[in-house]
Image (tube, helix red, strand yellow):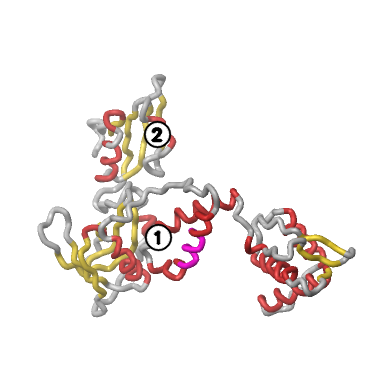
Amino acid sequence: MGVTKDALGRIRTIDKCLQNNLRKWTLEDLRRACSKYLIEENDRQSEVAVRTTQKDLEHMRNGKFGYDAPIEVYERKYYRYTDPNFTIYDQPIGKEEMSILREAMDVLVQFKSFSLFDEYQGVLKKLEDKIFREQGAKPIVHLESNPHLKGLEFLDTLYHGILNRLVLRINYQPFNQNSPSEWVFHPLLLKEYNNRWFCIGHLDQDERIANLAIDRIQKIEPDFTVDYEDFDFDGEQYFKHVIGVSVNPAFPPKDVYISADANSAPYIETKPLHASQELVERFEDGSCRFKLFIQPNYEFKSRIRSFGEGVAIERPAANQQD
């Protein structure tokens, strides 16, 4: 079990006390200091038990929380650090903690395009510096990312448009158009797929849902003259039966069967293409047949094509409606 906020506060209080070498600290002195901290922190009476303080000292000593504090008892009743310069704040990060921190950093930096994280940039930078100051600190997690993707500068504007329920006037140029069009857009959701970002929403006075690839956006400005409408949009339900971001409400989901040879079957079985995927049949040669309940779209067909000749979509029977 991890250290709680109150326990961490008590440990910091004990550390502060033991750094004061001009005073002799009894167990009761440390208990009272911890009680005072909790009273001030929680704005209520919160006396700490003697046994709790003893456990805190034990945890600080035995390295349970990564401190390995050199605490000794002298004259049979006073506590102090054997190293007068010791403090829990100057301790090196352990290997296990380092692994956790590196993984956390790898995840957090993926969201640096959002101003939501601006106030944490200083903290993240200090954490990053601490990690790479440690000997042998090398990344052990690599997440797919492309910081040079076009349009990332619009992520924050779209995010705040959704958060603050703002209508956005967007200059957008699809791949099949020679010039951009201006859309009055009600943003509903940001979605990442295949290392690309999309904004899901609808055009003004149009309940049909559209998805805009942010790399095709050229300009965004808020339009305060138009009232925002969200149509009670549920992203989880909207994308439930598709792979990717392309949804056509006119086509309901259906059972789709795919065949995979012996080389491709393990990849599909261990990393399902969709949450609805089921193994229908396993053959003696190692090939398999799978069933998915989905709405076939461009992204689904693209995933199948990525396997080459090893995976194929089965054609529906002649008496089965497509």
The C terminus, quarter of image: top left
**What residue did someone put label 2 on?**
267
- In front of the other: 191 or 69: 69
- Left or right of 271 on screen, residue 80: right
**What residue did someone put label 1 on?**
111
Residue appearing at x 84%, y 62% in the figure = 73
Location of residue 236 by image quarter: bottom left
- Tell me the magenta residue range: 122-128
Amino acid identity at mark 1: Phe
Q: Is residue 24 visible?
A: yes
Against 95, is 309 above or below? above
Residue appearing at x 81%, y 63% in the figure = 51
Query: What percent of the width, then of the height, locates residue 68?
Result: 71, 55
- Indicate yes or no whether the magenta region holds residue 254: no
- Left or right of 140 on screen, residue 8: right
Residue appearing at x 25%, y 64% in the figure = 202
Location of residue 305 by image quarter: top left
Main secondary structure found in the magenta portion:
helix
